[in-house]
Amino acid sequence: MNPRNNARMHFTRSSGVLVHPTSLPGPTGIGDIGPDAHRWIDQLGAMGCALWQVLPLGPTGYADSPYQSFSSFAGNPNLISPSALVEDGLLETSDLDPTPTFPAGRVDYGLLIPWKRRLIDTAFERFGSDSDFETFKQDNRTWLDDFALFMTLKDMYGGSAWTLWPPKLRDRDPDQLEKARKAYRGDIERHQFAQFLFGGQWKRLHDRAQRAGISIIGDIPIFTAADSADVWANRDLFQLDEEGRPSVQAGVPPDYFSETGQLWGNPLYDWEAHRRTGYAWWIERFRSTLRRVDVIRIDHFRGFVNYWEVPGGADTAIDGRWVDGPGEGFFRSIETELGTLPIIAEDLGEIDPRVPILRDRLGFPGMKIFQFGFDTDRRNPFLPHNYPKNSVAYTGTHDNDTTRGWFDSLVDDERTFVLEYLGTDDSEIAWDGMWAVWKSRAVFAIAPLQDVLDLGTDARMNLPGSMSNNWQWRADIDALTDDVIANMRALNKATRRKPGRRTRGR
């Protein structure tokens, strides 16, 4: 064991709920980071929870997935709260009209996005400028200038990918970029203003969480979207062809989720180019994320050991190959700049033996998923009695069916195993699974809000490999009843997961 691990994270035995802000209830078509999110913080505290896992918060592009964001640094303007803008005097209540008739229980992005954008534009016109805004632009210039220009040009070209823009803009000709900055100065500033609003509202929410003793677990997807400001502004850090398209792309081989694997389409990094810069881009990415959250879940942690490289023109992920990633030196370089990293390593799926070795050398807890435990026998590492202390245990994640939906889909022998293991019937199967996870040795126990509410497959957040009906689920306004809160509080007390000191290990 590396002796430096003695200075690693000191996470306290505690619990939490996984729910993306878009899924929170509220009256304006999507969960946001305004008053209803503040109420959610209070509800978490009443439950006796100390953790809120939020998933990525960036502006969504392809299929509305936060794992395919236009930026690794920006916030999602759709999460800006109209109510908070009214409270701040940037909108009048009448500005919200006409408000679309939003569906209950899901996000309709087609209705939402133009309405939300109109409100932000109205707030911008009313705002003008002030010293706080100017300071924000200066403090975030390393990513904000390129992002705002990227989004402005994307608007100008009908939302098309940057690889389809005129070649001089695609290839970032300095003269053309300067002309664009002058010609579209107002539009660029509108995008900067949206980020200013997001940053301010999120800071207030994060501060509220800190006062309540709630640590926020954020997410860093290992890969970036091909159509993003990240790739457009840093082409030398990615493996691209002359026109900016991925020469190789990310994915995973056939696994639990898909017989043909998952073809993500993200460009792969030129790790040697990153190493030559001292991983400067990554250091800023971690620094930016740690300003917003207390703990980071590294999505696809195994990709830092080795990753599945698929040819750029492939239609499936089958014909790929494993290529070594940057390994331990990557994390040591970031630690040198930022200190101890409060990280959860997503170490699921097909795992190279070097992955748990690296995870343990770095002292990061891995992930255990209750739903993965019932296809073999009692030695299965995903069964709760086998969880190590330095792990984060979930009933399921955003990529799984709800526990109720999962259980209903099992064959008879598997269902019998589940019921025998839990010593129960199936009347409250989600809560029975939570009890098993909460009683385990794992330092963190987390359940999606859908399991707290014991919902079925209709409430599933994401089905990997599918292209529709994902990232839309929302909780009903009255779903989190006093009884549910009291039951969570009792669960945390009985399993000694009551909130203690702060969970961040910095």
Image (spheres, helix red, strand yellow):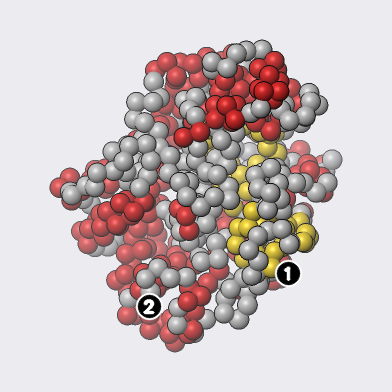
Q: Give the mark nearest the N terminus, 2 or 1.
A: 2
Q: Is residue 200 above or below residue 447?
A: below
> Is residue 62 placed above or below 91 in the rendered structure?
below
Q: Position of residue 396 (x, y in %)?
A: 60, 33
Query: Which residue is denoted by mark 2 in the rendering?
Result: 181
In the picture as drawn, the residue positioned furthest to the bottom comes out as 175
* SS at badge 2: helix
| Quadrant occupied by the N terminus | top right
- Report the front residue among 384 and 148: 384
Q: Residue furthest left?
A: 94
How many labels were placed on the picture? 2
Q: Residue at x 49, y 16 (%)?
A: 487
**Residue 61 percent coordinates (x, y):** 46, 59
Per the rendering, the mark at residue 308 is none
Residue that numbered label 1 is attached to: 272
**Residue at the image position 58 percent from the left and 17 percent from the top:** 426
Q: Tell me whether the residue at label 2 lies in contact with that at label 1, contact meaning CB atoms closer than 8 angstroms.
A: no
Residue closest to the eye, 203 or 315: 315
Residue 59 sits in which quadrant? bottom left
Q: CA distance from mark 2 to mark 1?
A: 32 Å
- Looking at the rendered structure, the kind of residue marked 2 is Arg
Tell me which corner region of the image, top left, top right, bottom left or bottom right, holds residue 241. bottom right
Name the residue: 37% across, 63% down: 192
Q: Secondary structure at mark 1?
A: helix
Q: Tell me: residue 82, above or below residue 436.
A: below
- Can residue 311 be seen? yes
- Label 2 crowd bin: few (<14), some (14–19), many (20+), radius 10 Å: some
